[in-house]
Image (cartoon, coloured by chain):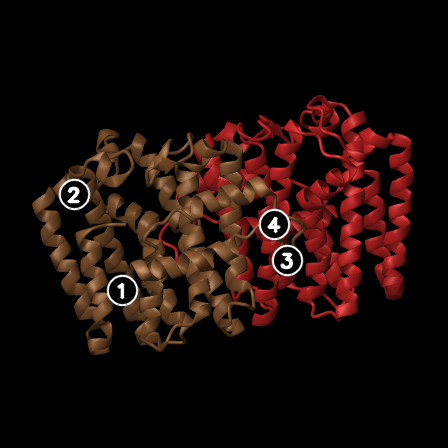
Chain colours: A brown, B red
Amino acid sequence: MAAFARRFEGVLESLLSGEAVEGEIIRPARLVAAMRHGALDGGKRLRPFLLMESARLFGEPGDALMRVGTALECIHCYSLIHDDLPAMDDDDMRRGRPTVHKAFDEATAILAGDGLLTLAFDIIADPATALPDPIRVALVLELARASGLGGMAGGQALDLEAERDAPDEAGIIRLQAMKTGALLRFAARGGAIAMGASPDAVARLTRYGEITGLAFQIADDLLDLTADAATMGKATGKDAARGKGTLVSLHGPDWARARLAQLEAEAAATLAPFGAKAARLNALAAFIGSRPS
Amino acid sequence: MAAFARRFEGVLESLLSGEAVEGEIIRPARLVAAMRHGALDGGKRLRPFLLMESARLFGEPGDALMRVGTALECIHCYSLIHDDLPAMDDDDMRRGRPTVHKAFDEATAILAGDGLLTLAFDIIADPATALPDPIRVALVLELARASGLGGMAGGQALDLEAERDAPDEAGIIRLQAMKTGALLRFAARGGAIAMGASPDAVARLTRYGEITGLAFQIADDLLDLTADAATMGKATGKDAARGKGTLVSLHGPDWARARLAQLEAEAAATLAPFGAKAARLNALAAFIGSRPS
């Protein structure tokens, strides 16, 4: 995963170049710098890794899949930049570095997020992402639905409402399925779609992605309750301090650990038809349950 | 144009429904309301109108073109919502109504912009936009380039820099070609691409779109110098008060009027090979030069 992250960083960096491409006029230097600050942050690149490993069930994923992965990561990074803004979660630090609006300014952070969001669709639609037109256009639609008002962005809107009016358990599950689940679901499902997998295989990877999303969130909430700020590189216990309910705060850490084990088994059962080929995805589900990105 | 705007409003409204579609979970009511506030504002819908009229040179544009028009307008409206934010232009009113962050709150306005931006690509990629896959994916790429870091969003970044460090004439022209020109260029060019026009025809419509963008900006800057707030429904003289240079402030209103006449003639010459079919686009160029939207 670390080797993948290094290789991925190079591809993402080349796409965040300061040189304008066909159809662009210039790329303003300060905006490019802010986008790079927000995107090239040495993250684990969990979502693109998941996409690549999902694709690998159906063949050797090539450069086209790496590019789809950068698009997905652009969406993830834009959401972090906007979520960190003073009007949203108001975070000054992320991964031990100043957030984009702290390192630059608020207006530039808003535009850097907008730029990354737009670039995601640019990358997938670009013929340089060497997949057939029907697959590229299907991936644009899937990614838009996963990240828009009925997915990730909608989840952030629900999260803001949750500070004023605490949701019940069903509400928490829905909020998390949108805010963090939708992109992980896309990662697993998108890898299968990009490789032209059968409808049954796409459905299995979709379910695997949903299970992974649930496990990721529970592990994250468990860590938020237990870890200290030094380990996380950002403020912790913050959700609890704001009175935001999580499944872990509702049911306790013992329940959370049991649920994670259950989800890991469910992921393995979902991928059973793929046999030994699914070993890495099973290991990934275990990793996600044990330690979030 | 007024009849078109009414018909357009109905299509856009149906796409901004509160009902989740396939691949979405729910659409949060407050976010939908903010997106509707920002998008369904009774605007003139100049960009979609231009797209439709460009397409009409090549045949009867159908519902698919209307949908591409709504995508383009979603981009325009997201940019207005984000530009109005306190960290950007800090405007309280637009078209005589409170801006989205005033009517809702800042966080919701940021997310409403993000939601509209994402929805634009959703709409084009959706098979309900009944154009061939290669054309839908080409339109996604064109729209992303026009609106991203090397187009509209980049232009807004340059505009912010211009407040600190006044650009020279070439810098002003570049800023405006990105901030307002890129979407008008897309409108004219995209209409031709969507209808499968020849490369020569696409090039002519592209040039027509660029000319239209120049005329739009000069007319807008001329109005900003001369109109009062009641006519515009928003604060005026604001750019001048901030010391932002425009071509009109550099060269004066007489130069601007002569330049507008020149651009109108240039638009007509560019479209001459289309003969009488181009009458409406020629009238549109004259309209844009005489009174901006």
Q: Residues within 10 Å of mark 1 (few under 14, many from 20)?
A: some
Q: Position of residue B215 (x, y in %)?
A: 81, 43
What residue is rendered at 23% in x and 68% in y? A280
Q: CA distance from mark 3 to mark 1?
A: 35 Å
Q: Chain of mark 3?
A: B
Same chain under badges 1 and 2? The reply is: yes
Q: Is residue A258 left or right of residue B270?
A: left
Which mark is first along the chain, 2 or 1? 1
Residue A288 got which mark? none
What residue is rendered at 68% in x and 25% in y? B235
Residue assigned mark 3: B66
Residue assigned mark 2: A248
Q: CA distance from mark 2 to mark 4?
A: 41 Å
What residue is rendered at 64% in x and 54% in y? B69
Q: Is residue B215 left or right of residue B174?
A: right
Same chain under badges 2 and 4? The reply is: no
Q: Residues within 10 Å of mark 4 (few under 14, many from 20)?
A: many
Q: CA distance from mark 3 to mark 2?
A: 47 Å
Residue assigned mark 4: B147
Secondary structure of residue under mark 3:
helix
Q: Amino acid at mark 3?
A: Met
Which mark is first along the chain, 3 or 4? 3
